[in-house]
Image (spheres, rainbow, N blue to C red):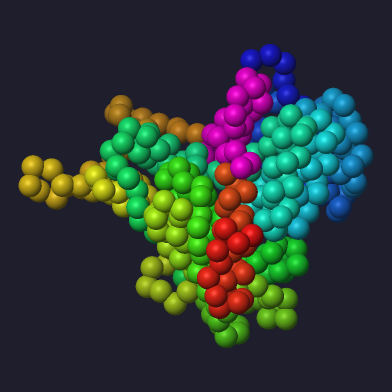
């Protein structure tokens, strides 16, 4: 596999500490985190002390970090608004880039990122870790074998009965571009398109909603300041693809529904069989005149007194990303695919605002 890769972390907040840095630390034989940057320099200092290689550097300006020729890979873990500019600067500086989801705040920015990756010759990927769940990996293989046939209808869910994040910039439309649609709906849409292997949208009809303020709404993280809440609570999309396939996307941080959480869940319907990722994987079909449901055991068990220790999706994501860089192979999440996700998300927002369908061939 060659020498260790040197990693620079840009943005040392919640997603860095909760996902990326612990996952990269688990790959310590393959990578070193040698630089940390955050506009709040104390966060970068703390991250360097906990995760950094000996002599790791700390920055408050990401452009200074990018000048270090020893850095091979950059992880961009900042609010959505800055994803594009930082990623493009990093690619132009000769770094491979892992950018946290969503790809960008706008579709135009996502397209700029794709072009920058092509021009630079460096790898760009987006942090859609749900592709790396055992259920997703298994179902992708089943679909690839042709078991479902032509997938013509799908339902994609990212629903919380209550689960509005009231910290950081999650509620800030300027920084994030939206609420649950761009935050968690982006995961379920990405997984749906990936499993269908369909990236040609034709038309979108979207709606979005906001609940009335209620300080006693049973949100697990407590109430939020309504003046700071400038995004939707729920958004829904009806998506028609060029080949006629239909996708229904439902996403919410706060929906009055009986189910406490449905995140991330996908149901796929083909002309040979159907499948769903929800509490594991299930495959449904007819066989010998009977309706059949198959539920594969996704655990690592198999030996008495041993439950097995499987990689987390976040570690699998990091490992597969580092392998792609070292082996010069395509990453699991291609930037062109992530760009289509951003284009559909934006189309839902545009349609919700205009009250009219959004047609992609009119761009």
The quarter of the picture where residue 257 lies is bottom left
The residue positioned 70% from the left and 58% from the top of the image is: 105
Query: Is residue 16 rendered to the left or right of residue 291?
Result: right
Q: Position of residue 67 (x, y in %)?
A: 91, 34
- Report the residue at 35% width, 52% height from top: 152
Magenta region: 312-336
Kindly report the secondary structure that dominates the magenta region of the rendered protein.
Answer: helix
Residue 227 position within the rendered picture, expressed as x and y whole percent measured from the top left: 72, 81
Residue 329: x, y in percent?
60, 24
Residue at figure coordinates x 55%, y 35% from the top left: 332
Q: Position of residue 128 (x, y in %)?
A: 57, 45
Q: Nearer the viewer, residue 202 or 5?
A: 202
Q: Is residue 328 magenta?
A: yes
Q: Is residue 47 depicted above or below 93 in this figure?
A: below
Q: Is residue 66 above or below residue 282?
A: above
In the foreground, 78 or 12: 78
Going by the image, does 303 lie left or right of 322?
left
Q: Which quadrant holds the N terminus?
A: top right
Q: Residue at x 63, y 41 (%)?
A: 335
């Amino acid at each position: 596999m060659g020498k260790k890769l040197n990693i620079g972390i840009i943005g040392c907040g919640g997603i860095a500490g909760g996902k990326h840095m612990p996952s990269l630390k688990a790959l310590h034989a393959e990578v070193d985190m040698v630089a940390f940057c955050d506009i709040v320099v104390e966060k970068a200092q703390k991250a360097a002390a906990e995760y950094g290689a000996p002599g790791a550097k700390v920055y408050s300006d990401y452009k200074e970090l990018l000048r270090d020729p020893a850095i091979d890979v950059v992880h961009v873990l900042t609010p959505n608004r800055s994803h594009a500019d930082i990623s493009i600067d990093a690619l132009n500086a000769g770094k491979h880039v892992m950018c946290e989801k969503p790809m960008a705040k706008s579709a135009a920015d996502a397209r700029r990122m794709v072009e920058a990756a092509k021009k630079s010759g460096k790898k760009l990927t987006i942090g859609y870790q749900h592709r790396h769940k055992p259920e997703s990996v298994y179902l992708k293989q089943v679909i690839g074998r042709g078991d479902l046939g032509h997938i013509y209808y799908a339902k994609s869910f990212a629903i919380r009965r209550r689960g509005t994040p009231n910290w950081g910039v999650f509620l800030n439309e300027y920084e994030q571009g939206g609420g649950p649609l761009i935050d968690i709906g982006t995961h379920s849409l990405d997984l749906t398109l990936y499993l269908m292997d369909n990236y040609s949208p034709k038309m979108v009809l979207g709606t979005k909603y906001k609940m009335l303020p209620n300080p006693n709404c049973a949100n697990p993280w407590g109430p939020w300041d309504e003046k700071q809440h400038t995004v939707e609570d729920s958004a829904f999309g009806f998506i028609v693809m060029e080949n006629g396939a239909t996708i229904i996307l439902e996403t919410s941080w706060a929906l009055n529904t009986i189910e406490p959480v449905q995140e991330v869940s996908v149901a796929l319907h083909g002309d040979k069989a159907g499948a769903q990722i929800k509490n594991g994987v299930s495959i449904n079909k007819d066989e010998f005149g009977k309706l059949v449901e198959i539920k594969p055991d996704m655990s690592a068990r198999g030996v008495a007194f041993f439950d097995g220790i499987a990689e987390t999706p976040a570690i699998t994501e990091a490992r597969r990303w580092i392998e792609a860089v070292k082996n010069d192979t395509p990453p699991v999440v291609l930037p062109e695919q992530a760009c289509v996700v951003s284009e559909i998300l934006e189309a839902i927002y545009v349609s919700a605002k205009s009250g009219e369908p959004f047609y992609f061939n009119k761009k």
